[in-house]
Amino acid sequence: MAYIDVFNGDADGICALHQLRLAEPLESTLVTGLKRDIELVKTVKAAAGDVVTVLDISLDRNRAGLDDLLARGARVRYFDHHYAGTVPTHRNLVAVIDESGVACTSGLVDRHLNGRHRIWAIVGAFGDGFEEAAMALARALEVDAKRLETLRELGAALNYNAYGETEADVMVNPAALYRIVSNYANPFDLFAREPLIAHLCQERAADLRRALKVKPREARATTACLLPDEAWSRRVSGTLANRLALDDPQRAHAVITPRVAGGYLVSVRSPRGGGPSAVEFCRRFPTGGGRRAAAGVDVLPESHLNDFLEAFEEAYSRSLQ
């Protein structure tokens, strides 16, 4: 029997898996990728009796791969908070899915473990932009302000490393980053002792300074920021989108980044004031998906950019009428 862990290479995926393996130590095969490497389940080579744990990737985008694993007799645990569609019913599937928008995958694992390694759920929630959820978890542990800021910075650094079109864009591949994180039971030790984390924090801050100098296109209900065709743009797209949403939560925000292969990658954050959820809007496009507050379009053809911007403003300006 083999154990296989399939996870998104961002802060939420890494911290969700880290909680599980702190509680349930075992040797497993890692299957992961960058933020938009979503269709990972179809790459898993599992046989009857193997145990596959899937964390923080859309079931809807991995339905065919999941069906194949179940048909081969693998046992699957699936934790996720993205749009899932219809969840299959199967004796070998345990699905912990919550699309409500109040919890990230690290939060779902925290519930599953009854808070045994909650400090890492806080890191994952901060990294994934779940500020309120992170603060609620931190209050339960009575984390003071200074330590809370360390957890926020650590989560942001882990998340920043997941954004890039290829591994050449990021500082370290996500599997290697997870292995580094897995050496630390205490996130404060990771932050203080691991040189890579300090490097990620420095690079993230530098990339964000560059991005904030780009003048956005502002309309009545939306802000759209078209970044230049640079590796730093692809790295910072998620960080910038989260920053814009935190600074101005009543507007919808889109960060648009040129892809090396052509077209654009889009990160969308929906407003608190109304309008469609981010995933509702992004699913209008063939490669769109995500969750209620944060979603994206993996490939937007260059010729469709103006149509996207018009649709984006129209969708969210309706809520202001």
Image (tube, helix red, strand yellow):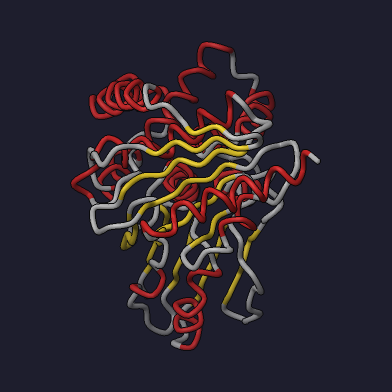
Percent position of residue 160, x then y:
37, 36
Residue 115 higher or lower than 212, as above or below: below
Q: How many marks?
A: 0
Q: Could you say which is closer to the camera, residue 172 or residue 229?
A: 229
- Left or right of 168, for residue 217: right
- The residue at the point 32 percent across, 59 percent down is 30
Which corner quadrant holds the C terminus? top right
Instruction: Quadrant for the N terminus, please.
Output: bottom left
- Examine the rendered structure and indicate whether residue 278 appears above or below residue 200: below
Q: Residue furthest bottom?
A: 71
Which quadrant of the view contains residue 115? Answer: top right
Quadrant position of residue 256: top left
Residue that appears at 36% across and 27% down:
211
Considering depth in this image, is 84 or 231 the residue closer to the camera? 231
**In-image side of 50 versus 307 (left or right):** left
Figure check: 8 above or below 133: below
Residue 314 placement (x, y as % from top left):
66, 49
Rendered location of residue 107, percent (x, y): 61, 44
- 93 or 271, nearer to the observer: 271
Q: Residue furthest right?
A: 321
Taking depth in this image into account, of 251 and 172 the one nearest to the observer is 251
